[in-house]
Amino acid sequence: MKAITTKGKQKAMITDTRQQDRPIAIWLLICCAMIMIMAVIGAITRLTESGLSIMVWEPFKGIIPPMNKDDWLRLFDIYKQIPEYQQENIGMSLEEFKNIFWWEFIHRLWGRIIGIVFLIPFLWFLIKGRVRKPLLPHLFLMFVLGGLQGGLGWYMVASGFADRTDVSQYRLTAHLLMAFAIYGYLFWIALKLLLPMPSRNSAFTSVKLHLPLILIPLLITVTIASGGLVAGLNAGMIYNSFPLMDGQIIPSSYSDIQPWYVNVFENVAAVQFNHRVLALSTFTLTLAIWIWSLFLNRPNALTRALHLLLLAAILQVTLGISTLLLVVPVHLGALHQAGGLVYLTASLYAFYLVRRDKNLSLY
């Protein structure tokens, strides 16, 4: 009788904890949605070559756009000092400058809004005592990472002010990976807060699918990194055929740069080929896991998660190939970047469902 009473108290405590954590989980998911929108805005900013249009970093004053013609002319004169204008956009009109300015302005403004949407509820939950101690370090780290992402964004933009007409592909990739890392971190913690405590009734998931499923988000991350290099080098503007590249499986210019390893990061042919291989490898593994799972006695929740994972994989590959064949139109390029986040989300969700059977800890 005592054991039953104790078990009942533990169940009640778990229920109370979940009710307390649910608003925090929803808040984190809202932040995730905003980061996904930010990724789309960032892709548009990149594809319209708008990222170097604002050459000043003003964390607070920068929320106010130019209010008159003198403000516009001042910013335009600053832009005229960098190589992008002098070598690629010489003779650009003020109206044309405004077109690229607004995308970069919106990109920076949305980043500030995300910071506010994170900070104000965080302080409110903290003051009200709604944040349990195990969760507190995670929320502080999330806030710090968000600030670092802003600094990294400026560090990326600054790379295009002196000796080049574009930002560094290395810094662009770092900025992109940081965004995906923050998104994945928030989503993972939200899952742990939102979903009920697991049972140990599905041992097959941890034994048979745990290791294969951990490879998917890892491969997606590496593919995203290679996609950052593709974007940074404008490598999607060449070899616009599929599956061959200029009639070849491996382009003849793959190893033109010496030493050989530099090709991986700076040779447009190699960068695009590597991105193709990584993307197709990730898709193939996803399909193989999905087929394998059909022969397992899987729970309904995991079945749905694996279906979503395969659907996200098909969507992302379709977007990637379409973007390439159509020579990177802005709308498809932006959707392709969003598709990467959707694919990552589905992979983390499926992996969480198999992992929670092995780990009852919330954090």
Image (cartoon, rainbow, N blue to C red):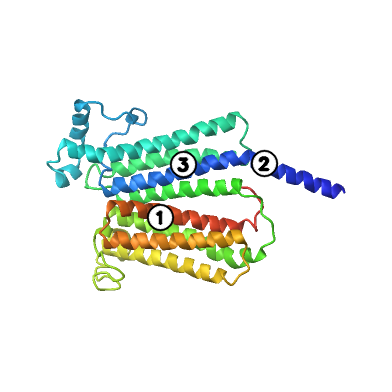
Residue depicted at 53% across the width and 39% down the height: 27
Q: Give how far across and how far down residue 330 sits, in percent.
A: 28, 51
Depth order, front residue of 52/171: 52
Check disc 3 and report the residue beneath it: 145
Is label 2 or label 3 in front? 2
Residue depicted at 36% across the width and 47% down the height: 40
Q: Is residue 81 visible?
A: no
Residue depicted at 36% across the width and 55% down the height: 336
Q: Is residue 49 left or right of residue 16?
A: left
Q: Give how far across and how far down residue 224 sits, in percent.
A: 39, 56
Which three-letter amino acid code belongs to the residue tagged 1? Gly
- Residue 225's label in the rendered image is none
Query: Which type of secondary structure does the marked residue at label 3 adopt?
Result: helix
Q: How many numbered markers are drawn? A: 3
Q: Is residue 90 left or right of residue 39?
A: left
Which three-letter amino acid code belongs to the residue tagged 3? Leu
Query: Which type of secondary structure does the marked residue at label 2 adopt?
Result: helix
Which three-letter amino acid code belongs to the residue tagged 2? Thr
Q: Is residue 328 visible?
A: yes
Q: Label 3 neighbourhood size at 10 Å, few (<14), some (14-19), many (20+)?
A: some
Check disc 2 and report the residue beneath it: 17
Residue 277, quarter of the rendered image: bottom left
- For the view shown, which residue lies furthest in the right direction? 1
Q: Give how far across and how far down residue 190 sits, in percent.
A: 56, 46
Q: Label 1 neighbourhood size at 10 Å, few (<14), some (14-19), many (20+)?
A: many
